[in-house]
Amino acid sequence: MRIDEIDFERYSWQDLKDTQLGVDYAAYRGWVYVSVKHFREPDVLDLRGGESDQYDPYSHHFIARESQSGKIVGCMRVIRNTPELSLPVSHHFPDALIDLEPDPVLITEVSRFISTASSPRLRRDVALLLIRELAGYSFDLNQNHVVFVVERTLSRWLKSLSVPLEAIGEERWVEDEHGDLTPYIVDLKECDRALAAAHDVYAASESSSSSAHFGP
């Protein structure tokens, strides 16, 4: 399997509702997030093994699938900050977004960031291109900052990819996620430049946004 044999697509929750892809996507999240990683209790799963929560209708969902089989090999959820529902980071780390330079209303939050492709290199490339899709989507909306709330292992891995994580709070135990987590903010323009310089697969890929890869 090569990276050019994987398709990356973005969906709203409404796009996915009552579709087979929506069922498969929820089951994929349930398998990784609940059954493998144990970030949530098994009782959150639906009868088909799917995982979802109250943030899904307020999110866009990026899904990576093998072109021929349709098998899901990666995903990322981007949660919008809305008057109806604030970002999860504000619940777990109430002070994290206070006094930040970017307007918190223009900040989104990444979660359910998963890559399970068949080899370490392909898993890395899928993750990179999910971030590329995030950057293109965000630039189109003039949103240049995103929050990650992650465990130490994932933060180290993201930093090893050259993702410029900036901590905006101290690590703490988050009961809902069954782990010690730290909130980080990422300047997506800086991130886009860094990943394009560090990774050929990122730089060579088509972007959905004309602002991506050294945009203004």
Image (cartoon, rainbow, N blue to C red):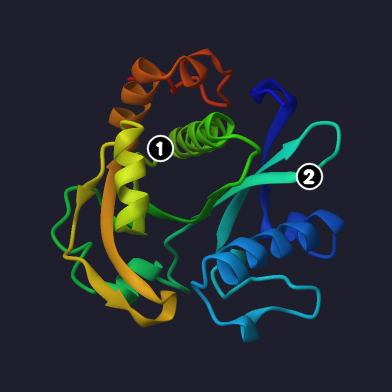
Q: Nearer the viewer, residue 124 or 91?
A: 124
Q: Quadrant of the N terminus?
A: top right
Q: Position of residue 101 (x, y in %)?
A: 17, 48
Horizontally, residue 194 falls left or right of residue 124, namely left
Q: Which residue is mark 1?
A: 142
**Direction left: furthest residue:** 99
Contact between marks 1 and 2 (CB within 8 A): the answer is no
Q: Nearer the viewer, residue 69 or 107?
A: 69
Q: Visible in this render: residue 167?
A: yes
Label 2 crowd bin: few (<14), some (14–19), many (20+), radius 10 Å: some
Query: Relative to residue 26, is residue 167 depicted above or below?
Result: above
Q: Nearer the viewer, residue 112 or 187?
A: 112
Mark nearer the N terminus (1 vs 2): 2
Query: Relative to residue 149, is residue 63 depicted above or below?
Result: above
Query: What residue is rendered at 68% in x and 78% in y?
Result: 45
Q: Which residue is mark 2?
A: 71
Give the secondary structure at mark 1. Answer: loop
At label 1, which amino acid type do we have?
Answer: Asn
Q: Visible in this render: residue 106?
A: no
Q: Position of residue 66 (x, y in %)?
A: 76, 35
Give the secondary structure at mark 2. Answer: loop
Q: Quadrant of the C terminus?
A: top left
Query: What residue is rendered at 37% in x and 27% in y?
Result: 192
